[in-house]
Amino acid sequence: MKKLKTPKKEQKNEIVQMDDYEKSMISDWKKIDQTLSPLKCTQKEDGFLFETLSGKGSDREKKDLVHAGICLATGAKSSIFGTMLINSCLNAGRLRIDEMKKSEAEQVLGSILNTLHSLKPCDEIEGMLVTRLIALHFQIHKYMIFMGGQDLTVEQVDSCINRSAKLTRLYNETLGALMRYRRKGEQKVIVQHVNVNDGGRAIVGNFDASGGGGGR
């Protein structure tokens, strides 16, 4: 007589709870994720099309949201000029989306749009500077990747280093121009010394009190 096999009890996988630090990282990420662009990029036969992420609303509202999403991402008042800025960013950064797979190209375009949206350019000047920063970033890394090539000569490596250094300098200059423009010419005053004399008088700035009279 054959023995009947007793079915094995299914072992339930115990879930190890995350610690507070890991949970806080997820919470912070969700806060950032909520500020992303309301648009997505979809590849069509004649190119790429910006569409609303949620798909909600009437056709008129969807068109208005696409217009608003492009303008908020680029600082432009015209969505046409905003689209031109996005295209120039892709071309100058040598991001060959036409050679990518459909899903990859859509992800790259979406990430560029989200990055622009998070940087919040306020007008066309800031939009031009911000798109230049993104393009320069990818150009710099392109030459840094070239430097790791095994078949390069010393001269070719030096050329990549020089080009990368020049692009990095241009990146820093562009970033400085953006920061100055955002301050709108405001001057920053740095107080290095504050000395309060008898009578409550304060002397602000650099001074030499080592001796000599002659001060006024």
Image (tube, rainbow, N blue to C red):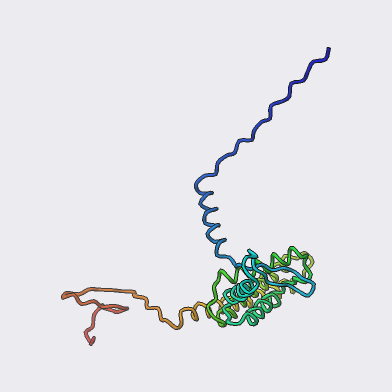
Is 57 displayed left or right of 201 in the figure? right
Question: Which of the two residues, 165 or 67, is positioned nearer the viewer here?
Answer: 67
Q: Residue furthest right?
A: 1
Looking at the rendering, which quadrant does residue 196 occupy? bottom left
* 40 sits left or right of 129 in the view: right
Q: Is residue 174 above or below residue 97?
A: below
Given residues 69 and 33, the one toward you in this image is: 69
Q: Residue at x 77, y 69 (%)?
A: 152
What percent of the width, then of the height, locates residue 58?
Answer: 63, 70
The outermost residue toward the left is 199
Q: Quadrant of the C terminus?
A: bottom left
Quadrant of the rendering where the N terminus is positioned: top right
Residue 109, given in percent of the width and then of the height, sits at: 68, 69
Q: Residue at x 75, y 72 (%)?
A: 96
Q: Position of residue 190 (x, y in %)?
A: 37, 76
Residue 124 x/y as whole percent: 57, 82
Snapshot quadrant of residue 161: bottom right
Count of number-bearing discs? 0
Tell me what residue is drawn at x 65 percent, y 81 percent.
80
Image position of 68 with respect to 9: above or below: below
Residue beneath the point at 21% across and 84% down: 213
The residue closer to the viewer here, 150 or 136, is 136
Q: Residue furthest top?
A: 1
Q: Is residue 52 above or below residue 5?
A: below
